[in-house]
Amino acid sequence: MIFTFLKDIFIDVTYLETNGLRFGITMPFHPWEEILKCAKMSEKYNFDSIWMADHIVGMGLKRLDALEAYSTLASLAMITKKVRLGTSVTNIQTRHPAILAQTISTLDHISKGRVITAIGSGEAMSIVPFGIPWDKPVSRMDEAIRLMIKLWTEKKVDFDGEFFKLKGAFIDPKPIQKPYPPVWIAANSPRTMNMTAKLADGWLPLVRKNYENDLKNILKVRKQVRKNSALERGILLYSVVAENDDKARRILELPAKVFSLFDVNGLDQPGLKISHNFSFQKFSYSQKMITQIIEYAQEHVSFEMIEQRYIWGSPASCIEKLEKWIKSGVNYFVIVAFVSEKYREAQYKFWGNHILPYMREQYT
């Protein structure tokens, strides 16, 4: 028993030392000028990667604008030099995997090998209003990822799947990264976590209470099927940093309450009964619906129910929260600055001047 425990610690520490502790940050959905500014700041303040949400419809309380992810990242590849370029996450339902494989390969060439693709099974806001088929989303995602890998690594592909059928298909040029650009999976269910273990180069879930146990299960399966293949242990975290905890809470509280309703299972309140579930798998954005969600959140959700789900407070408070996730096994943080435009530059400064230097000194 003691040996097993020490072995688990040794594996975790060795992985962190080998691959380092990394931090990415998501770009805003719009407008282009603000995205461009944020991309430049990400390099100035030494983030490892920048990420674009791949949504047809944006997510916000006032505006729902969204620029297309891959064309935006291609443009950002031309004005950045170091940061990797990721999607958080690509909705596999909205593109044929051959088109997506070519798109990713193209971006890999434009960026000189800096692409990371995180893939998810989709969300209602980018599917339902547009009449896009959404049958068997997890099975479709599994098949699509396998097909993309074939197109990236084989000269000719014959594929007879449940959803996709190709004969003599190929894409050229192949990606710069070998054997292919890293594929992460936004796995939040047992089935997609099993898929992550077998297929993915990284795991990028939303906040999970059981992250440590879920990671152990993923690694157990992975050891059986991929042996020594490393797995990036990511997490997507929403954050507000300020001079002190009180100010950070004032900025965070309302949007955090609203966002929590998309995943009521994550609310830290035993026995809590929420009569509505505005799940990403069910919910289509509209201003009317946003108004209803705000009213419901203000009435039913307290900050105490949700505060553990966010990285918030002074830089010292945020560091303390990050360290808890590191102990759970995270080695790659993808941060969403959960603020309006007027607070955004301050977030980069807090991270770049205070949090990142400390974390890298301690853990890298």
Image (cartoon, rainbow, N blue to C red):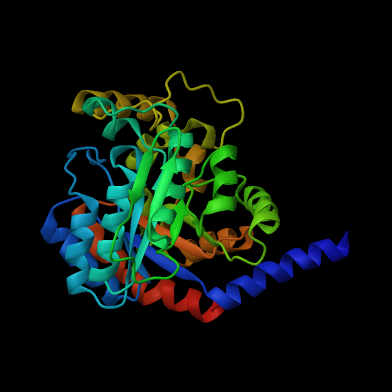
Left or right of 14 in this view: 233: left
When the figure is inspected, residue 178 is found, relative to residue 336, above or below; the finding is below
Towards the viewer: 133 or 349? 133
**Residue at (57%, 38%) from the top-left corner?**
191
Q: How many marks?
A: 0
105 vs 350, nearest the viewer: 105
Seen as rendered, the residue at the extreme bottom is 361
- In the rendering, at what x and y percent does residue 289 appear? 26, 24
Q: Is residue 311 left or right of residue 224?
A: left
| Residue located at (53% from left, 65% from top) | 331
Residue at the extreme front of the image, as rendered: 168
Q: Position of residue 88 (x, y in %)?
A: 36, 52
Residue 223 at x, y percent in the picture = 69, 58
Q: Is residue 361 left or right of residue 298?
A: right
Q: Quadrant of the N terminus?
A: bottom right
Q: Position of residue 186 (x, y in %)?
A: 46, 47
Where on the picture, by quarter, is residue 229? bottom right
Q: Is there any visible trace of residue 178 in the rendered image?
A: yes
Name above or below for residue 93 compared with residue 201.
Answer: above
